[in-house]
Image: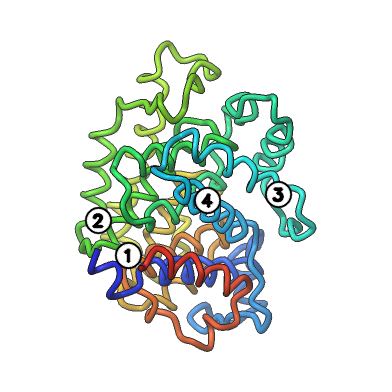
Amino acid sequence: MTTLVHKQAATGALTGLALGDALGYPTEFSDVPSILATFGPWRQLDLPGRATVSDDTQMTLALGRAVRTAMDRGLLTPLRLARPLREEFVDWYQSPENNRAPGRTCMKACHLLKDESRPWQDASQIDSKGCGANMRVAPLGLVPGLSDEQRAGAAQLQSALTHGHPTALAASDLTAHAVRLLAQGAEPTGLIGLLRSYALENRGRYHERWLGDLWRRAGDPSPERFIARGWDECLEALERLRHAVRTVSPETDPCLATGEGWIAEEALATGLLCFLLFVDEPLTALRRAACTAGDSDSIACLTGAFAGACLGAEAWPTEWADRIEYRSDLLTLGALWDA
């Protein structure tokens, strides 16, 4: 706990996530030549004067508030988390500020979640493994006092409310675990190995207490077979990442090595790649993540969460951090979890 408090890992991770989001939001849906033509050399990419974020940060805050509400009532349990999480997601869905090109899966699932008589499992989009599952999961790597089972179960549950594909669940769990490891002081050079070990340990573990009978909607013969599909795809993504860290030039688009990030396991791998290429240069890591052909804001927000968890709040210059949209909300949650 002392490491988390000393460097303000939660504040650093949430700030980095929002900064990456704001930096990548204007470049999303553009290829690298178009980004360079519009914004100039990628190493000089600057935060927009009005640092507007996308649905990535909005949904991260929604998850953070839901976790805070659940834990104000006692230990984090599936029942305690599911209700405020559902309410926060529906509030986001209906908000006039939900005008930042939100993903189709989130919109469809949240529309179904409005019907309170519907089990959330029936709203879950079982075939979707979009990066909306894990772009928002960082808070669960930052909340102190959770057991491994609580952290993993909650990470998968928050994915499952919208993205029910097993790879979305596994990638969310793995993303939260990566944030937690970095916040606790894990060496970035050993991170891929730690994540690979975690994936292998959990490959056959279905969190029924948190997910209920979600697996039955996918047509798999057993819950273990269902979740193993997701972990296997994440292990393949980690293998591509392991090779890329050793071979990729920082000057080439990271998406060419680890994928464009529209799906959960690729967002994790490419976000990690950008972080690992520039462990001691967090702004350069964000700029590299934002200048990509893929889902630039989601890749960059994950890169920022990893860098901020690793380096703490001081990783980010004040003149950038103070301009970010929802700054006070981010600071409130960061201070709560850093303390």
Q: Secondary structure at mark 1?
A: helix
Q: Relative to 26, is 190 above or below?
A: above
Q: Is residue 37 visible in this depiction of the protein?
A: yes
Q: Are marks 3 and 1 in contact (CB under 8 Å)?
A: no
In this view, the mark in front (2 or 4): 4
Q: Residues within 10 Å of mark 1 (few under 14, many from 20)?
A: many
Q: Earlier in the sequence, mark 1 or mark 2?
A: 2
Q: Secondary structure at mark 3?
A: helix
The amino acid sitting under disc 3 is Asp
| Residue 191: mark | 2
Q: Position of residue 113 (x, y in %)?
A: 68, 34
Instruction: Give the residue pinned by disc 1.
Output: 276
Q: Position of residue 79 (x, y in %)?
A: 49, 33
Instruction: Give the residue pinned by disc 3.
Output: 91
* Point 63% across, 62% down: residue: 28
In this view, the mark in front (1 or 2): 2
Instruction: Give the residue pinned by disc 4.
Output: 69
Q: What is the CA distance from the residue labelled 3 to the residue labelled 4?
A: 15 Å
Q: Are marks 1 and 2 in contact (CB under 8 Å)?
A: yes
Q: Earlier in the sequence, mark 1 or mark 4?
A: 4
Q: Secondary structure at mark 2?
A: helix
What is the residue that sits farthest to the top in this orientation?
A: 221
* Point 50% across, 72% down: residue: 331
Q: Earlier in the sequence, mark 3 or mark 4?
A: 4
Q: Relative to 91, is 306 above or below?
A: below
In this view, the mark in front (1 or 4): 4
Q: Relative to 260, is 231 above or below?
A: above
Q: Is residue 260 visible in this depiction of the protein?
A: no
Q: What is the CA distance from the residue labelled 3 to the residue labelled 2?
A: 36 Å
